[in-house]
Amino acid sequence: MSEPDNNAAAPAPVQPRDQVLRVFSRYPSALLLLVVFSVEVGVGMFVIRDVRTASVEAQQMYARSVLGLRQIGELQYQAQETRRSTLYALTTNDSNLQVEYADQSREADRRVTEGIAEYLKQAQMPNEIEVGRGLQRDWSAYLKVRDEVLASILEGSIKEAVDMDLNGGVPSFERVRQDLEEIKRLYDQQASDQLARVGASSRRSIVRLVGVVCFTLIFATFSVWAIQRSRMLGAVQLAKLQMEFVTSISHELRTPLAVIRSAAENIADGVVGGKEQLARYGSVIRNQSRQITDLVNEILLFASTRNKKNRYTLRPLQASEIIDLAMENTAELVREAGFVVERRVEPGLPSIIGDLSALSQCVQNLIGNAIKYSGQTRWICVRACIDETKIPHGSREIQISVQDRGIGIDKSELPHIFEPFYRSPAVSAAQIHGTGLGLPLAKNIAEAMNGKLTVESKLGSGSTFTLHLPVAKQKQPLAATGVKGRDAVAQK
């Protein structure tokens, strides 16, 4: 068996665009469309958040400005009412009306005092607090003059009351009026500032919305293009693999057919004489016919698993049965290649549910694969054990593994080895013949039995392919099979 050619030409570098498309091609179209839909939902949530933010800002503007203006309007009205009641008391000589107007003035000033206190409680900005405190001081000064005016009125000193009001009450109330106007101006300014902020926020939301929508459209367009492009590249790659498959199959068929034809012509022409020589030619024809039959059977079996046309007979099986049948069917191949197959089966393994012929074919493919890629190392280990640690919900599985110490598989090739028709450049350069269907067929069989096929490999150190099969659900465990834990079969 020839070694890989380390001097073989390296494959052409992959363009960055094709690398991106290969990443996209690993995912189904539905997943990419789901990503696009998720982005659209994200855009919708983004817009809703901005709308809610603008709504909250508008509500805050209403509460701070409109309601504040209403509060200041009420303060102005009650302050004017306080002033009017005092003036009414000054303009009448009826003592009863004077008392009534005095009470009305005091009631109105109580509301103004409470309103000023409420305003100071709600004030947040330094200028608001400063104006509020100034209003509170000026209002207290006016009330002091007003109280003296009302006292003079009730004592009958109208002229003294008028002089007092003109000299102290009018200037004091004018300062209160100016303070109220200043507060009103602050509210107007705050309303304008908040309105400008809401407008700026709305403009930012529009810019963000346009940007996100443009990004979404570009992303959606790129996704659709990538999906179509990846499908096209996948189709081209599949066609290329199929052409390589046809070429490989042609070689695999042409060589044994040529040998069979040559041997048959020699026999027919009488070139072969004697029983020993005839037996040797017959052995050649038998071996080459078996090689062609195995190749055709592999192709037909792969096609049947791909089209879901295979019908399996499921029954309880022991791992030892599967391994024994697989080793029996590959015994001649192992002997001719001069391999040592080490068999390790844990005793007392529980049964699995599967098709004996299909599962043995799966293990046969793994053994044949190990023989083909073992290089100069003529050793294979077939192992069966139970694993209860890595399976969720307390389930158990039987693991049947085939290990070799051959050329191994490069890490970059591992994601592709189960693809139909795939053969790595290193294998092709080493002129190791094959169809690229053995591992995909084994994987299809494993998945049909509710199992899976995994691989661990290191370049230059060998590979281990493991068939994972769930343990059959049964009420009572099966009796121990009595298989020895470890024995070696040397076939040379």
Image: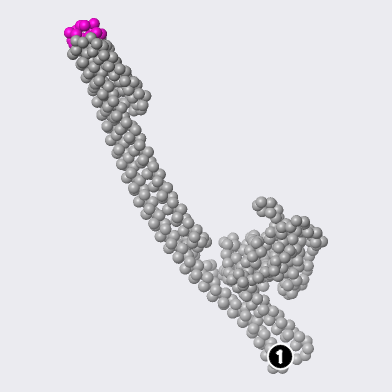
The answer to whether 328 is drawn above or below residue 318 in the figure is: below
Between 307 and 427, the one nearer to me in the picture: 307
- Which quarter of the rendered picture does the C terminus lie within? bottom right
* Residue ID at (66%, 84%): 259
Q: Quadrant of residue 221?
A: bottom left
Question: Where 141 sits versus 43, above or below?
Answer: above
Rendered residue at 42%/47% (across/down):
45
Apparent side of residue 105 relative to residue 375 in the rendered image (left or right): left
Q: Residues within 10 Å of mark 1 (few under 14, many from 20)?
A: some
Q: Residue at x 24, y 11 (%)?
A: 96
**Residue matched to label 1:** 267
Quadrant holding the N terminus: bottom right
Question: What's the residue type where badge 1 is placed?
Answer: Ile
Towards the viewer: 64 or 13? 64
The furthest residue to the bottom: 269
Q: Position of residue 169 (x, y in %)?
A: 22, 14
277 up-or-down from 366: above or below: below
Q: From the viewer's perspective, tell me whether residue 322 is left or right of residue 64.
A: right
**Could you say where residue 5 lies in the image, as x and y percent from the top left?**
60, 70
Quarter of image, res 52: top left
The location of residue 108, given as percent across then percent down, is 29, 19
Q: Which residues are magenta?
A: 151-163
Q: How would you classify the magenta stretch by its main secondary structure?
A: helix
